[in-house]
Image: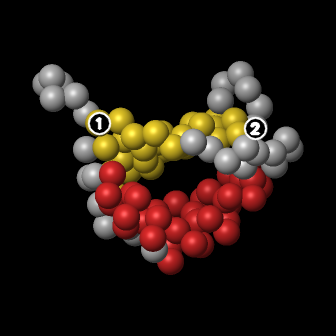
């Protein structure tokens, strides 16, 4: 399992519109092969900041599957204009030591 992580900085005052757009965008990513789960959390102390976490079966499911799909084009149109700056995506893997 892979965890995709991105810190989303939303243009000031655009959080409500971003949250509405994210509700529309979630089904797009959820329909992707290799998708497991998505969570989006607003920062507790920093306005207009969100933590995006998406579980994938593999990095390829995100990078080579979702990002090269028509669903991603729609995701991008719904969400990318809210970001300033564009988020940096990182991937984390489950530890083999977990029980």
Q: Is residue 49 left or right of residue 29?
A: right
Q: Residues within 10 Å of mark 2 (few under 14, many from 20)?
A: some
Q: Is residue 92 left or right of residue 87?
A: left
Residue under the point 25% across and 33% down: 94
Q: Is residue 47 left or right of residue 62?
A: right
Pick the residue in front: 27 or 52: 52
Q: Please indicate, yes or no, whether residue 2 appears anywhere in the rendered image.
A: yes
Pick the residue in front: 45 or 64: 64
Q: In which quadrant of the rendered view does residue 98 lie?
A: top left
Residue under the point 59% across and 37% down: 7
Does 96 appear above or below 56? above
Whether pointer 2 and pointer 1 mark residues with C-beta atoms closer than 8 Å, the reply is no
Residue 16, numbered circle: none
Mark toward the viewer: 2 or 1: 1
Q: Which residue is mark 1?
A: 93
Q: Which residue is mark 2?
A: 48
């Amino acid at each position: 399992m892979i965890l995709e992580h991105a810190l989303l900085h939303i243009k000031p005052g655009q959080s409500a519109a971003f949250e509405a757009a994210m509700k529309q965008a979630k089904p797009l990513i959820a329909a992707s092969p290799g998708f497991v789960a998505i969570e989006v959390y607003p920062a507790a102390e920093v306005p207009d900041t969100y933590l995006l976490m998406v579980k994938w079966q593999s990095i390829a499911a995100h990078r080579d599957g979702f990002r090269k799909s028509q669903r991603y084009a729609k995701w991008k149109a719904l969400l990318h204009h809210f970001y300033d700056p564009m988020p940096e995506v990182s991937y984390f893997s489950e530890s083999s030591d977990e029980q």
